[in-house]
Image (cartoon, helix red, strand yellow):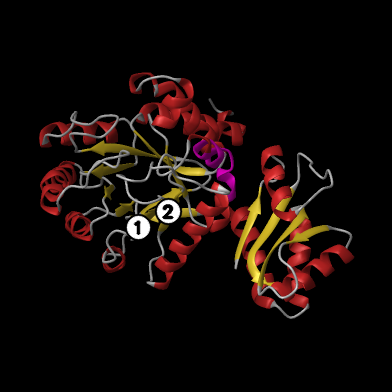
Amino acid sequence: MTIQLVDIFYPNVFKRYSTKYNIYRDLHEKDLHALEIREIDFKLAQRIKKIILSNKEICYTTGSRGDKFSDLLALGSFVVFKELAKAIIAIGNEDCGRNVLRTLQKINDYDNNSFSIGGITFPLDKAHVVGILNVTPDSFSDGGKFFEKDAAVSHGLKLLEDGAEIIDIGGESSRPGSEPITEEEELRRVVPVVEEILKQNPKAIISIDTTKSKIAEECLLLGAKIVNDISSFRIDSKMIEIVKHYNATVILMHMKGNPKTMQENPYYDDVVSEVFDYLIEKVEMAKKHGIKNIIVDPGIGFGKRLTDNYELLKRLNEFKAIGHPILTGLSNKSFLGKALEINVEERIVPTVITETVAIKNGARFIRTHNVKQAIFAAKLNSFIDNPEQLNNV
């Protein structure tokens, strides 16, 4: 069973759900929300639907008599959904009812929580900037610029000086169509850089961008605090043991296939719900193994069609219901270049515009090449949300 609060007030989203649930009435309103419960017992779904309709609220289900499972869609407000949850509990299904309440609570509490990495507290009422350091010869944006150790270390320290709170270091390109490299080569690229940055700045918070457990372990031993696994443990199953053993923070990202194959005709019926379900599954798996410090990344640009990337950005707010901070990596990506018909060198301004939108829609960690500009975006969003901060300026 998966519970998702859907921003159905968007006309295209309403149209998609109208098709799924055979909604023929014109119910679209700009402040409307939808609570969808997927893969719920069919008989329970019918009981819940009856309760909702008796309270003169709106509800639809999929399937027919004889089906084991069904999907349910209730339309309304947070108040309506909270009362619905209490009614579900009252008919004896505490598990479903409490899950609905927990989902709503996660959304309500999202901006009021904080997140700790390496003893440093990151309040989630504002966004934090993660600087990208690619120690590779072939990354799409900056491949080769920082391939040598001294250049990489110097750039990493400069990112911190510019205000990045975390440095994400990767030795293997994940651009579409890229070939994997050997474990030995990846170790040779990243270990000396991690070691030297921490030697010169022991307080630096380092994230290692890798899908290989050996690379993660070597960097965690040196003092890295985060593992950014774009495969969410799929490529190397030992990764989950390493993250647990070192009590590391993990970034779990959605990606179809692997970097080499991910852009070979990706397809989604509904990209947001499919990515949402994937991340819920990976988060639950991590928690079962005792991993608690989790960041989620919907993987914009990884195995997505051009329209999928913009749909995820628009509805990023829905991922708050997972209950973990959202990270986005939008910097200089091809979904900007293709839509605007511009090359990599022209994507700095579009990057900061989309990063601003992402922050407004719930992103709390911004992974970027453009640290100073992302900090501007984070600060301006914070001022918009809390204008009183400027009273003494």
Q: Is residue 316 magenta?
A: yes
Give me the C-alpha separation between circle 1 and circle 2.
Answer: 8 Å
Pick the residue in front: 89 or 235. 235
The secondary element bearing badge 1 is classed as strand
53 versus 173 height, above or below: below
Residue 268 x %, y %? 52, 48
Which numbered disc covers residue 37? none
Left or right of 60 in this view: 376:
left
In the rendered structure, the answer to whether residue 117 lies left or right of residue 298 reads: left
From the image, give the main secondary structure of the stretch colored magenta: helix
Q: Position of residue 1 (x, y in %)?
A: 60, 68
Tell me which residue sits at (85%, 58%) in the image.
Answer: 57
Can the viewer see residue 111 in this picture?
Answer: no
Where does label 1 land, which residue? Answer: 249
Amino acid type of the residue that numbered disc 2 sits on in the rendered structure: Ile
- Mark 2, Cα crowd under 10 Å, few <14 / some 14-19 / many 20+, is many
Say which of 45 and 222 sits in front: 45
Query: Is 306 in front, or is 328?
Result: 306
Identity of the amino acid at label 1?
Thr
Q: Are marks 1 and 2 in contact (CB under 8 Å)?
A: yes
Q: In this picture, which residue range is highlighted in magenta?
A: 308-318
Which is nearer the eye, 390 or 6?
6
Asked if residue 249 lies left or right of residue 265, the reply is: left
Identify the mark nearer the N-term, 1 or 2.
Answer: 1
Residue 196, magenta (yes or no) = no
Which residue is farthest bottom? 92
Residue pointed to by mark 2: 295
Other residues around mark 1 within 10 Å, as few (<14) / some (14–19) / many (≥20): many
